[in-house]
Amino acid sequence: MKKKAPMLVLVRHGHSRANAEDRIVSSLENGVKEEWGLTALGREQAAGVVKALREQGHVPSDPSTGFAIISSPFRRALETAQQIADSLAADGHHDVEIRTDEALRERYFGVGLEGASSDAYREVWAQDARDVSVGPGCGGESVLDVAGRCEAFIDGVRRSETADVVFLVSHGDTLSILATHVGRRGNLSGHRAQGLDNCGFLVLDS
């Protein structure tokens, strides 16, 4: 009998130091640094994710439920993932390990926007609405670039993951593109309609 595909729970990272400083931190080199982790508010938000999911009926309380957490390697996502793991451990699930996958990394906005004010996102998203194949200048990823890496990643998770519930901890644009493309929730040009707040979550149908 074919095993049912796992429930996929998309979780955006908690409030981060980059959010607090209103800066774009999208390169892998910068994103993994400790200085770009969560704020105290972000840790508090992340600690409440599992409880909120349970209250909405998305996460079963059955002790036999198997969980997995796959995170972006960025510090803000990993710290969010650790808070989720700690919450699951408090519920008796002590063997949940956190794995990282670069497919979940932040959308790279290019050298020209690295460290810039987040006000620059507006122009990027306006360009996304015009043409999803064009990314920000200086090497930034287009919507199609991100959709391609996310689709291949999700296909692999659905084929090989043995857990019942898989938390995917990632970033704003990566998750809005993933939800739109893989979750078939509209056109990629309007991916920001699926944007999540800090520690917002979305359950993808299997």
Image: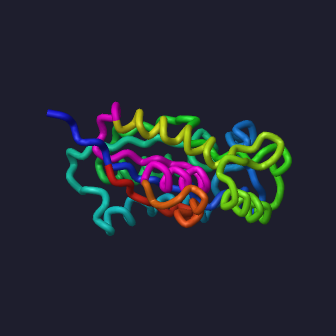
Q: Position of residue 182 (x, y in %)?
A: 45, 48
From the viewer's perspective, tell me whether residue 174 is left or right of residue 29. Answer: left
Q: How is the image coloured?
A: rainbow
Residue 73 x/y as whole percent: 59, 39
Q: Is residue 164 magenta?
A: yes
- Quarter occupied by residue 118: bottom right
Classify residue 165 as left or right of residue 185: left
Residue 71 magenta: no
The part of the image, by quadrant, that contains residue 157 is top left
Choose between 124 and 22: the one closer to the eye: 124
In percent of width and height, residue 140 lies at 75, 44
Closer to the camera, 108 or 67?
A: 108
In this rendering, the answer to whether 182 lies above or below 96 is below
Q: Residue furthest right?
A: 112
Q: Which contiguous range is marked in magenta?
A: 159-183
- Residue found at the very far left of the displayed protein: 1
Residue 204 visible in the snapshot: yes
Image side of residue 119 versus residue 107, left or right: right
